[in-house]
Amino acid sequence: MLATILASCGLVVLSSCTNEDDKDIVPTDPIEAQLQQMTLREKVGQMFYVRPECLDTTIHFNRPGGIDHSVDDLTKVKLQAVNKTMRGVNEKYPVGGIILYAHNIEDEAQLMQFIPEIRSLKGSPLLCIDEEGGRVARIGRNSNFNVKTYESMGAIGATGDPKNAYECGNTIGTYLHHYGFDIDFAPVADVNTNPENIVIGARAFSDDPAVAAPMVTNYLQGLKDAGVTGCIKHFPGHGDTKADTHFGYASTQKTWDEMLSCEMVTFKAGIQWGCQLIMTAHIGTPNVTGVDEPATMSSVILQDKLRRELGYQNIIITDGMEMGAITQQYTNGEAAVGCIKAGVDIVLGPLVFTEAFDAVVKAVEDGTISEQRIDESVRRILKLKQSIGRLQ
């Protein structure tokens, strides 16, 4: 009996010690190990991908309608290197990714010097670019680079041969990988069904989802085989709109059933293929959600439809949050907090990065957003970094 009692006591003592010690055990999973060591600010930083100008607080974006009205100013500034101001801001505001635009890129020599400077920033940012081919090609349309160019994705789609989409994605991915980029925000998975569409047009492969879907997956495969991660956009589909969300509100009047037979054909194909990122559209979908809010801010679109119904489990990234469709309706803080609450993992290009960042930190501290919710997104982001060899 005494032996039994002593054994039980020993078991209790051992169990107590084990439970206490568990708090100090570092998980064997490298993602969980890194997550456990991160501060709240470091976690929040991973959820922001920004223009390099957003780290230079001497540059102000304050024109009505969003940053796109200030592109001429940015072209004149030509921020093409990491400066002292950026490093100072970055000490307090770590960042998960940097997206470069045409005015940030002069030539090969400048780009090859700029990218290592970016990689040295706090947060170990991934390097991103919009290099679709056709009219959206930051490097392809720069005469200082000797790379193959493409008329449009619409022209590729018109060939009817998905191998041409693969060749395009692989060619673009090859030179992006050479220069050091991790993510290409391409291809466009929209189905261009509205001839009055002024923002998508020939950026889409086709007005027929059966043609567009294999083009999208082959382009993604081409990027992947070149060592670059693709991103399909703009969910739930920007192809049936008339207005341009860069400058203000745009919407589609389609019902969800109508989308399932058209727009969702390409997105489903991308999800089944295994795409790692899906970019949201800032379009309203009133006949799906019953309200006019942008899809970027809608939990119905992002959680009920994309995550639960379509089964997508990887990263959701916003379209640029500096666009008029967002800035005309929300403050920097409201937009950042709202889209994360709706289900977004990465906030791309907020108009004023520091304000958006501080608003998310405050929302966690006051309980508006739980830290567990932040952790969900950061796990997805760290998983991506691990898959491409960028996990620190």
Image (spheres, rainbow, N blue to C red):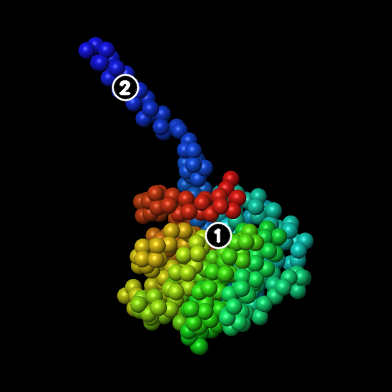
Look at the numbered disc 2 and give the secondary structure of its residue. Answer: helix
Q: Is residue 347 visible?
A: no
Real-space Cα separation, disc 2 to disc 1, in angstroms: 50 Å
Q: Residue at x 44, y 49 (%)?
A: 375
- Residue furthest left as drawn: 1
Closer-to-camera residue (209/348): 209
Q: What amino acid type is highlighted by mark number 1?
A: Tyr
Provide residue 249's location: percent of width, then percent of height.
45, 78
Look at the numbered disc 1 and give the secondary structure of its residue. Answer: strand
Q: Is residue 190 left or right of residue 76?
A: left
Q: Is residue 156 visible?
A: yes
- Residue furthest bottom as drawn: 195
Residue on which the image places disc 1 = 49
Q: Residue at x 49, y 82 (%)?
A: 208
**Mark 1 closeness class: few <14, some 14–19, many ≥20 residues within 10 Å:** many
Provide residue 201's location: percent of width, then percent of height.
55, 82
- Residue furthest top as drawn: 2
Provide residue 293's location: percent of width, then percent of height.
38, 72
Please count the marks in the image.
2
Q: Residue at x 59, y 69 (%)?
A: 219
Provide residue 359's location: percent of width, then percent of height.
45, 56
Indicate whether 283 appears above or below 3. Answer: below
Question: Looking at the rendered structure, which numbered label has been put on residue 11?
Answer: 2
Pointer 2 or 1: first along the chain: 2
